[in-house]
Image (cartoon, rainbow, N blue to C red):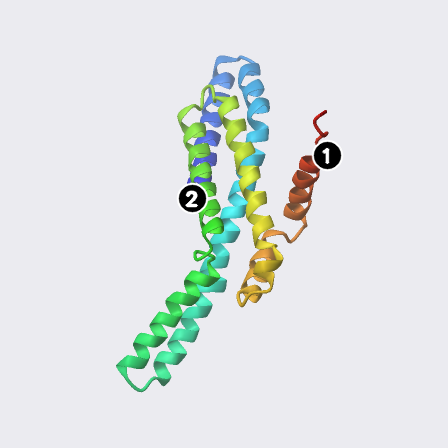
């Protein structure tokens, strides 16, 4: 939501500047340069929005709605309150498991990705006239590391062999439908592997 809001805010500011330049009869080269300088950051914003939208869709549709249907069926067929409590506990456990909240490393990475997205939005919105590109580049670099780490952990053989594998495959398919994350993660790993050895 904040990622969309930051986009709208900057586009609104851009339209105001363009209208002012047309009104004044100036060519607007300063705003054009500003736009060129911040363009790579909008690519980062789109990567952030892509990850967040797919995570949100996965959790809403593949996890919550599907488990809700299962719970509704079980409630309809239940005989007593004790069964209902058990079914509800199974429902909550399935939500936690399929949302990967019970895996500490994934939960921490998701939390830090959310914080980076908010930090990115805050920087864009509060520094529209002259954004701190160094800060934005640091956020972008950290986001790329975290999102690649998330993808690498979720692709691990340990998780692929667990009971959550069918749900995990859905999320990974949605996230990596065009092999972008796989190629990026592989590229990051190759860069790490290609570092020269230190002389003895």
Question: What is the residue that sits farthest to the bottom in this orientation?
Answer: 79
Left or right of 186 in this view: 3: left
Q: Are there few (<14), some (14-19), or many (20+) residues within 10 Å of tag 2? A: few
Residue 1 badge: 2
Q: Nearer the viewer, mark 2 or mark 1?
A: 1
Asked if residue 9 is positioned above or below residue 58 in the image, the reply reads above
Name the image quarter holding residue 6.
Answer: top left
Q: Are there few (<14), some (14-19), or many (20+) residues within 10 Å of tag 1? A: few
- Rendered-image quadrant of the C terminus: top right
Asked if residue 141 is positioned above or below residue 61 in the image, the reply reads above
Q: Position of residue 53 (x, y in %)?
A: 50, 49
Residue 46, visible in the rendered structure: no
Residue sitting nearer the eye, 43 or 90 = 90
Residue 194 badge: 1
Name the image quarter holding residue 190.
Answer: top right
Query: How many discs appear?
Result: 2
Residue depicted at 58% across the width and 49% down the height: 151
């Amino acid at each position: 939501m904040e990622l969309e809001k930051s986009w709208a805010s900057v586009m609104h500011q851009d339209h105001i500047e363009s209208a002012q330049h047309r009104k004044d009869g100036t060519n607007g080269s300063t705003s054009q340069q500003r736009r060129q300088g911040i363009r790579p950051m909008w690519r980062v914003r789109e990567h952030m929005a892509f990850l967040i939208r797919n995570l949100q869709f996965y959790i809403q549709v593949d996890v919550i709605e599907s488990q809700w249907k299962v719970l509704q069926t079980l409630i309809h067929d239940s005989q007593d309150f004790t069964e209902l409590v058990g079914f509800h506990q199974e429902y909550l456990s399935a939500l936690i498991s399929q949302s990967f909240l019970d895996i500490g490393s994934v939960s921490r990475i998701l939390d830090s990705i959310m914080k980076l997205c908010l930090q990115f939005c805050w920087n864009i919105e509060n520094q529209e006239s002259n954004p701190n590109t160094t800060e934005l580049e640091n956020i972008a670099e950290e986001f790329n590391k975290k999102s690649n780490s998330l993808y690498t952990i979720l692709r691990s053989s340990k998780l692929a062999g667990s009971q959550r594998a069918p749900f995990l495959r859905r999320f990974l398919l949605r996230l990596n439908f065009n092999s972008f994350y796989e190629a990026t993660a592989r590229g990051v790993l190759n860069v790490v592997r290609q570092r020269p050895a230190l002389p003895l």
